[in-house]
Amino acid sequence: MKAGVIAVQGDVSEHAAAIRRAAAAHDVDCEVEAIRTSGVVGDCDVLLMPGGESTTISRLLADEGIDTEIQAHVAASKPILATCAGLIVAASDAKDDRVQTLDLLDVTVDRNAFGRQKDSFEAPLDITGLDEPFPAVFIRAPLIDAVDEDVDVIADWEDNPVAVRQGPIVATSFHPELTADTRLHQLAFFRDKQAVTPAEADQ
Ligand code: GLN
C-alpha cells in the first residue's frame, strides 16, 4: 500500500508514523510518501491531510496544483483521513475567504469557534465503530456547525459533531495522529479488516 501525507505544512511526521503503525497492526506493507508537489497523489492508495494552518495549506495546495489531484483521488473513491486543518480544507465551506476549500465533504466549519472557547484539551470520545472511548486531542479545533444529510456523524463533543464520514473520507476536528492510539487511522483505511495486533499500538 502507498500512503501519501500532504506535506505542504502541518504535523506531517506524526501522520506518517501513525499510518505506519496502523498498517503494521494489519500486517500490511506500507510505503509512506510526503507530498509537496503535484504528480504524486495519483500513485497513492490512501491520503492523509494533517492539521496545521488551513489558510496556508489551502494556498500551497492550489499553488502546487495538488488541490485538483486530491479531488480526483476522492472522485475515484480512494480513502482520505483529514484532521483539524485538514478537515477545514476538505470542507465545502470554511466561512473564511482565505481558505480555498476543496469541497470534498459536505460540511460547514467554523475555523476558530472551538479554539477560542477552549484552546487545547484532551477528552475521551465515544466514536461509532470503536468499542472503547478514543483519547481525542483538540488543538484550536474547528467546529463543524452544519452537515449535509449524506454525512455520517461518528462522534460528538458537547452536542457538536467532531468526527464525520462521507464516502471515502473520514475527518476529525481533533488529532488522532498525536496519540499512540491508531484506531482512527484503522477505521479510515482498514475498516473491513480485523487487526492482527492490538488497536492501541504503542510501538
Ligand atoms: N485553527 C487552525 C486553522 O484554522 C487548525 C488547527 C489545527 O490544525 N490544530 O487552520
Image (cartoon, grey):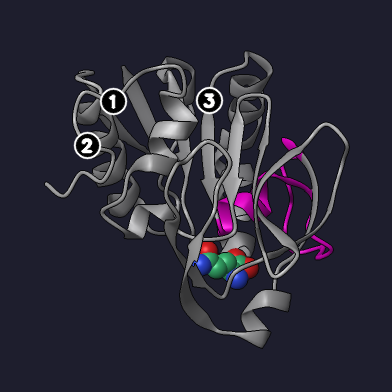
Question: Mark 1 near mark 3, Cβ–Cβ under 8 Å?
Answer: no
Label 2 neighbour load within 10 Å: few <14, some 14-19, many 20+: few
- Say which mark, if any, is on residue 195: 1
The residues bearing labels 2 and 1 have C-alpha atoms spaced at a distance of 7 Å
Question: Mark 3 near mark 2, Cβ–Cβ under 8 Å?
Answer: no
Judge by depth and name the residue closer to the eye, 47 or 62.
Answer: 47
* Above/below status of 201 relative to 175: above
Q: Residue at x 39, y 31 (%)?
A: 4
Taking the image in four quarters, ligand 1 sits in the one at bottom right
Residue at the far front in the pictured view: 131
- The residue where tag 3 is placed is 79
* Amino acid type at image mark 2: Pro
Q: Position of residue 143 (x, y in %)?
A: 71, 66
Q: Is residue 36 visible?
A: no
Instruction: Verify whether residue 101 appears in magenta.
Output: yes
Q: Would you say 134 lies left or right of 154 here?
A: left
Q: Give the residues drawn in magenta, as a range.
A: 84-105
Q: Residue at x 11, y 46 (%)?
A: 203
Label 1 neighbour load within 10 Å: few <14, some 14-19, many 20+: some
- The residue where tag 2 is placed is 198
Which mark lies nearer to you, 3 or 2?
2
Quadrant for residue 164, please give it: top right
Q: Would you say 178 lies left or right of 117 here?
A: left
